[in-house]
Structure formats: C-alpha cells, structure tokens
Image (tube, helix red, strand yellow):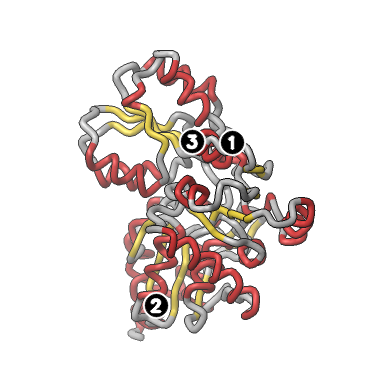
Amino acid sequence: MTVLDQNTAHDLTARIVDGPGGYSGVDGDEQWAAEVRRLLDLRGATLLAHNYQLPAIQDVADHVGDSLALSRIAAEAGEDTIVFCGVHFMAETAKILSPAKTVLIPDERAGCSLADSITADELRAWKAEHPGAVVVSYVNTTAAVKAETDICCTSSNAVEVVDSIPADREVLFCPDQFLGAHVRRVTGRTNLHVWAGECHVHAGINGDELAEQARTHPDAELFVHPECGCATSALYLAGEGSFPEDRVKILSTGGMLDAARQTGARQVLVATEVGMLHQLRRAAPEVDFQAVNDRASCRYMKMITPAALLRCLVEGADEVHVDPDVATAARASVQRMIEIGQPGGGE
C-alpha cells in the first residue's frame, strides 16, 4: 500500500460513526469508490449489490440483481470472498450455495420484515397442523426456514412451483401473503394455505395511491411487484377498465428490468422499493420511471451505507455463518426449485 493509499484509508475510516441506524460518516463519492475497488482487489473479493441498494452501492458493485441471481453468481465466481450488499437472509442464501467461500455482509443488523415474519418453530407448528402438506417458501426467508421447506420459489416462478405439486396435496405457502394470494388467484387452488406475513415496504404501497397515480398518468404502463399490497388493486383497476389490462404487469424485479428494455411506453409507474428505479433508469434512460409511492424505502436495505461497506472491507466483517446441517437442508429446497424449472428473477 502506498503512503497515499494509507492516508486515504485512514482518513475515510476515521470518519465512520456507528449509530442506531447503522454506520455513517462517509459519502459515496469518487474517492470512496476508488478505495472500495482497491480494497476489493486486496481481498480478492467480488462485490454483489441488490437492486434495492443505494445508488452509490449499486454503481461500485461488480454485479447488481435480485438475491437469488446474485447468490448463483457468487457460487460461480472465481473469487473466494463474496461481499454481499443486501439484507441478512440474502447473504445467508449466498453462503448456503457457496459453503466453501467467505461471505461478508457490511452490516449484519440489516434484517428483513418479511423474512422475520415466520420462524422455523412457527413453520414446524404449522406443518404439524397440516400433516402431509407440501411447504413452499419464498426465497425471502431465513436459512432455518428454508431447511424446513420442501420447495423454494421466487416471485417469478411461484405459480410454476405450485402447479408442479399434485392437485390433491395441500400446500403451505409462506411467508408473503400478497404473493400467496397472487398464486392462489392464478392457480385457482383452494387447498393452498397462505401465511400472513408481509414486507413492510411493499405492504405500504396501497391501492388508493395506485388508483390516484393511474388517474393522473392515464398513458403510463404499470409495473407492480407481487409482494405489494396494491397488486390486487392493480388487477381490479384493469378488470373494471380504469387502466388498460395490457399496461398492467405483475413482475419480479428481474421481470421489471426485462420489461423496461422492451416497453414502448414513455412513462412507467413502478410499485416496488424505490431503489429499483436506479436500475430501471439505467436499463431504459429514455423512459420516465416514477414510483407509485416515493416513500417506499427499506430502512434495512439502506443500512448498507458507504461507511458500512468501507468498514466491512477494512475489517473483514461481518462474516456470515450458517450451521452445516441447516445449510444442507436449505440447499435441497432451493435445488428442488431449480429442478422444476428455471428460477428466473428472485424477488
């Protein structure tokens, strides 16, 4: 390390402050980005960032995407160290699929309201109430819940996964109630039981906001994440003719990016976490992407700050660990999903 590099590293790390909302004190500027890239090279690490991360984090990353796609990239990467900028269950999934690699998360306190809405104990109790039922869990779950799961799913293949299960078998779907309701509506399956969990960000994007945005932007397309509380409202608006049906798209984050590259619309309303707008605008800069709710920001995702990432690379913390037996069982549920069909986009 040169004297200049040493001074840069010291000056930046000396500014880091740890508080209730996470690490702060460092701006995501060009000097910071250069230091991040230098430290990644020193560690022989690859940097992965979720679509909902801060723009500065996305821009400095080697790869940006949904959690499952990033975990698969981690497994295929030549580097032995993975730095995962996302919430904790996502870094766990990367560790599950890459057990021999070191997986770091910039702040292990970055949780997830959806993943936390069901525990392994709660799932075991639910299974006991429905003996013989097949458990389908969204990938947005902890490793311990995945270990109690028969088949994982993503938001883009949840319908396909449920359709693969014999019609006479009960299905327990967890943890997202809005994605579960979407799957039940599409499959018409009456023996599908849905856990009452939710992502606090997506649940907060409501039907009234959606209806108002549709009224004031009549020529826009509408991209809605199936975790949203407004997904049913979007389909209702299309059904009653308030919004043309061909302009309402229920999509995973990966599906949104694909649709963005293909859309002929000049404006698109987006119902998901606001961090997604950064990738959509990069994918189709000629399109005006606007959030249905511009307050839909995940405080856990935003705990992965420039300061947190710098601290992670300097200290090699926080390392993610998953019990080997739990990891083996969890890996099996993900593998069963992959065997059914291509998992596509994660969230």
Distance in Å between CA atoms under marks 3 and 2? 42 Å
Task: Name the mark nearer the viewer: 3 or 2.
Answer: 3
Q: Quadrant of the N terminus?
A: bottom left
Q: Is residue 47 left or right of residue 190?
A: left
Secondary structure beneath disc 1? helix
- Residue type pointed to by label 2: Ala
x then y, percent, for residue 301: 53, 53
Q: Residue furthest front?
A: 168
Secondary structure beneath disc 2? strand
- What residue did someone put label 3 on? 186
Question: Foreground: 6 or 123?
Answer: 123
Q: Which mark is residue 297?
A: none
The residue that appears at 39% across and 13% down in the rendered structure is: 241
x then y, percent, for residue 248: 37, 28
The residue that appears at 41% across and 19% down in the rendered structure is: 214
- What residue did someone put label 2 on? 45
- Residue type pointed to by label 3: Val
The residue that appears at 75% across and 59% down in the rendered structure is: 124
- What residue did someone put label 1 on? 203
Question: Foreground: 266 or 336?
Answer: 336
Question: Foreground: 61 or 179?
Answer: 179
Mark 3 neighbour density, 10 Å: few (under 14) some (14–19) many (20 or more)? few
- For residue 10, say whether it is visible: yes
- Residue type pointed to by label 1: Ala
Quadrant position of residue 125: bottom right
x then y, percent, for residue 321: 61, 76
Please report whichever mark, 3 or 2, sits nearer to the chain's N-terminal start.
Answer: 2
The residue that appears at 43% across and 63% down in the rendered structure is: 338
The answer to whether 334 is drawn above or below residue 53 in the figure is below
The answer to whether 28 is drawn above or below residue 280 in the figure is below
